[in-house]
Image (cartoon, coloured by chain):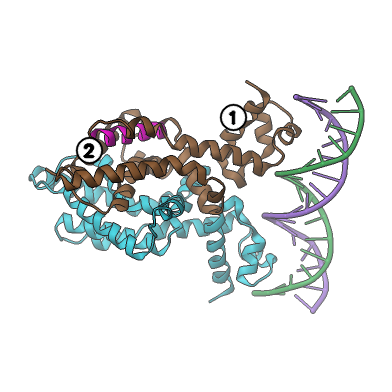
Chain colours: A cyan, B brown, C purple, D green
Amino acid sequence: MTTEDTIKHAAMGVFLKSGFNGARMQEIADIAGVNKAMLHYYFSSKEQLFDKVFSDAMLTLIPELDAIISSDRPLIEKMKAFVTLNFRQHQKHPQLLQFVFNELANNPERMQSHVKCIDPFNKYISYFGEQYLKEVASGNFKEYPLMQLVVIIQGLTEYYHLSRPFLAPFLGQHGVILDKAFEDNLLDQILIILEQLLLNK
Amino acid sequence: MTTEDTIKHAAMGVFLKSGFNGARMQEIADIAGVNKAMLHYYFSSKEQLFDKVFSDAMLTLIPELDAIISSDRPLIEKMKAFVTLNFRQHQKHPQLLQFVFNELANNPERMQSHVKCIDPFNKYISYFGEQYLKEVASGNFKEYPLMQLVVIIQGLTEYYHLSRPFLAPFLGQHGVILDKAFEDNLLDQILIILEQLLLNK
DNA sequence: GTCTATAAGTAGATAGAC
DNA sequence: GTCTATCTACTTATAGAC
């Protein structure tokens, strides 16, 4: 692994943990095992380093959509596969989504610099929308307004990972631990509900 | 309005916009129309000022649960009323939830100082859980694991408000504007889905 | 209670030796 | 490429006059 990658990896960890404003170049340097000056040698400024990390984070959020969405399996299977993959990815990177949403909330202009990152998501919307409308016309799927449906499905998949820091301590009071078993069970329920939600009867 | 309240109000705005690490005492002072020294006169430190604001934010998140949950209407009606109120409150304070979730993610120990704030939420879980199990036993409600169901319902209600900064620019590309009409429609769909989700047939 | 002025510490960034 | 040392700017916090 090159020094540049080591730094980027360390930066990812620190930015994810503390956000842009909370992150310290010194901490990144310490974790990377290099001097602070090296950070400015490879990335001229904190802002630039952050942009690389943020861009990577956004791209990680866009899972391997194409393989799923472009396949010619039935739409309901595609949707289940999509939700499952999305959920699993957030399991692997629990802080990623909160990080991206928050940096966008604090600094909405940032989205402009990363519009390219959302192309795959646009494709997802287009493909899904097209096929969904066909299924509705055929009477196979229930009818909802498209964009509202997208929000609802994403919410099913992603809300848990956003609310985890809030939920964990207080579900703990009810004797519930947010471990892998809980999450696997949650995903099972989500998939059941997704089917109820979409399929006509 | 006292000077103290003016400061707290200004602080709320700045902390919501920029988070703890991004907030500047100078900006709070400017918006409150007082000198920076006044902030330290009323609240000894930035941390203490933040704690007051954060505590208020958490309490705002807990809507008037009691009136709804303690009433003796049918459970399905209670749930709809609860979801509706929750959704409307986030409409009124769009940054609140993202703010709370993110500060907890950046600084999980903070939850310890604000455990008292989640008492009403615990009550909600207990009451809802008790009644839900009865309805399941009667065959009126579908059966899901309780905590997973709570996460799913909260996700239906709250995900939109968390993802808004991400969704807005790119749903815009599809010609969709996230205005009140969109949100009212979204809430309608959520209530329909909630009913499908809970009621047996 | 409210202000001005300033202290004390820390951050990101750079110069320059090796 | 990598380091040490340092600069400059900014931020929280305080001292003290009014």
Q: Give the camera-side residue of A49 and D18.
A: D18
| Residue A123 highlighted magenta (yes or no) | no
The disc at residue A20 is none
Q: Is residue B101 left or right of residue C9?
A: left
Specify few, some or many for label 1: CA neighbours under 10 Å numbering under 14, 14-19, or 20 or more: some
Q: Give the camera-side residue of B117 and B123.
A: B123
The disc at residue A145 is 2
Residue B173 appears in the figure: no
Residue at x 65% of width, y 68% of height: A30
- SS assignment at label 1: helix
Q: What are the residue bounds of the magenta stretch? A: B75-91
Q: Give the camera-side residue of B97 and B115.
A: B115
Query: Foreground mark, 1 or 2?
Result: 1
Q: Chain of mark 1?
A: B
Q: Chain of mark 2?
A: A
Q: Which residue is mark 1?
A: B9
Task: Determine the main secondary structure of the stretch shown in magenta.
Answer: helix
